[in-house]
Amino acid sequence: MYLLKFSEITIYFVVFIMVGRALIYSLQFVESKKSVHRLRLMNSVKKRADGILDTLYNENLDRLLHSIGRPLSIDSVKYNLVRRLLLGGWFIYITADWYLFEGRYPYNIASLILALYIFTQPVKGLPLFYILEKLKDLQLREKNKECFTLYSMVQNEFYTDIDRPLNMYATLNKLKPYFKAIDKALGKAILLWKRNPAEALDAFAVEVGTEEAKDLAQILKNVDLSSPQDARDILDSRYEQFVTKRHENHRRYRNNIGLIGYVAALLPVFAVIYNAMVIFNLEKQELLKFIYQR
């Protein structure tokens, strides 16, 4: 009898163990499936997000924004996202307002939204691209102006004490606070100077991104390796070349200012034409409404 009871208890125990293991396995299987589904969902969301980012990214716009210093830390993705959200939200709002409260559809506002969407595209030939190109030219002009100023200040340093060898690293550190447009480039050059002066000046030229900066970097390389007298001769011999380039840049800048003024003068004309089109559209709608009522 005791043996029979012991056998029953053993059987129940074995069954309990088997059921428990089955439950644990099933829970692990369910959890594993959940993890797989979660991973698939995350991958799907990531792919969609990457796809959206690809549609927002514009290499030319990024290059232009970088050349003007990326104001407000904006890049092409942020610009296109804000632009589409604002204009898209505005269009949805006027459409929903018309649908809910009926009345006449605001074609004039819809046309304005469409025009803004087209004209704010970062595409060559459209206003935004033109404006950014001009801002880039102005930024490069300011950088070239400061490169010429740096050239003159280094030259003056050599004439302060004729016989004293000039430490270019110390000179750049001393002059850096006087500059704004090329401040970042000078900081990079100073940071790399102790490792390799030539590489530091190459980094300066790349960061500034103008032909004048490349010429200045090459001159400073030669000056850094020369005696005080030879350095003065190098700086004096290249001074007129820098002055000539500066005059050419100024003449180009004056031409650009004239072109910008011409475009600005045309803006009121476009505004009048747009206003006339809106009035014509409203008059046409009123006329059609009058005809249908009769």
Image: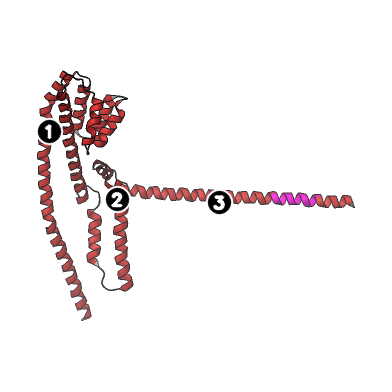
Where residue 181 sits, quadrant-wise, is top left
Q: Residue at x 31, y 28 (%)?
A: 192
Residue farthest along the front direction in this orientation: 161
Q: Is residue 188 left or right of residue 249?
A: right
Residue assigned mark 2 = 79
Tag shown at residue 55 = none
Residue assigned mark 3 = 34
218 or 33, which lies in front? 218
Pointer 3 local density, CA inside 10 Å: few below 14, some 14–19, many at least 20: few
Tag shown at residue 245 = 1
What are the residue bounds of the magenta stretch?
Answer: 10-20
Up the image or down, 226 lies above or below 150; here it is above
Up the image or down, 121 lies above or below 282; here it is above
Element under disc 1: helix
Q: Quadrant of the C terminus?
A: bottom left
Circles 1 and 3: CB atoms closer than 8 Å: no
Circles 1 and 2: CB atoms closer than 8 Å: no
Earlier-in-chain disc, 3 versus 2: 3
Q: Position of residue 180 (x, y in %)?
A: 22, 39
